[in-house]
Image (cartoon, rainbow, N blue to C red):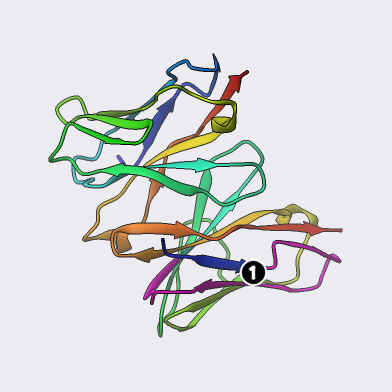
Amino acid sequence: QQQVKQSPQSLIVQKGGIPIINCAYENTAFDYFPWYQQFPGKGPALLIAIRPDVSEKKEGRFTISFNKSAKQFSLHIMDSQPGDSATYFCAASMLETSGSRLTFGEGTQLTVNP
Amino acid sequence: GAVVSQHPSRVICKSGTSVKIECRSLDFQATTMFWYRQFPKKSLMLMATSNEGSKATYEQGVEKDKFLINHASLTLSTLTVTSAHPEDSSFYICSARGGIQAFFGQGTRLTVV
């Protein structure tokens, strides 16, 4: 019940394309859903996060779509650039319990070709 | 944004020795920090939750005597890999919560030879 399932495992798009990464969760107690970007040899960096009271959040070229009834959320990257090539992780947590620990998805390796 | 500094970024040690990794929250106080381990092309695996002034909480399967965690202040947590073996070679990452956001350190690449 603590798992977060992420797909696809890898994704290749052309510059300007819109890669979409999907995540699904089981635990309805999760109330915070962040996305992280990780470059090789570096720690993850927060991209964008959403709470379950909204269905969409946009920050720059990054958009999270959230479907509470389906227990799914996804990351869309608009006008993708080669510099977006990285590994992306979705995560979920219960902010007020469990020490606010994050449960991570398996990761998606994104390649944006020039 | 908030900064978490992790040191060293890279360390090579001999089998049987101990290695200490430091994690500092530079501009905020963190009562809770987290330590993760990451294998190549894999997700982050939570090892333990570090609580300031109290004992760390370890995840199932993580040896507390091998991975010693100390959280002596609101801005510093340390992970010591004791009697390191080649199978301990990995990428270790710390994280600290500032508000509702989790901020990650740069990671430490440990190689045990």
**Where's residue B98, x and y in %?**
35, 66
Magenta region? B7-33
**The stretch drawn in magenta includes residue B9:** yes
User: In the figure, is residue A1 to the left or right of A31?
Assistant: right
Q: Is residue B7 left or right of residue A101?
A: right
Residues B67 and A6: in front is A6
Q: Residue at x 63, y 36 (%)?
A: B41
Residue B101 in the image, given as x and y percentages of width and height: 34, 57
Secondary structure beneath label 1: loop
The residue at which mark 1 appears reads as: B66
Q: Residue at x 54, y 26 (%)?
A: A81
Look at 47% across and 15% down and name the residue there.
Answer: A17
Image vertical order of residue A56 relative to residue A104, above or below: above
From the viewer's perspective, is B20 left or right of A17?
right
Look at the image and say whether residue B12 sits in the magenta stretch: yes
Q: Is residue A92 above or below residue A15?
A: below
- B16 or A21, which is in the foreground? A21
Which quarter of the rendering shows the N terminus of chain B?
Answer: bottom left
Towards the viewer: B99 or B12 = B99
Q: Quadrant of residue B86?
A: bottom right
Q: Is residue A45 depicted above or below A89 in this figure?
A: below
* Chain containing mark 1: B
* Type of amino acid at the residue the image marks with label 1: Lys
**Would you place residue A95 above or below residue B77 in this image?**
above
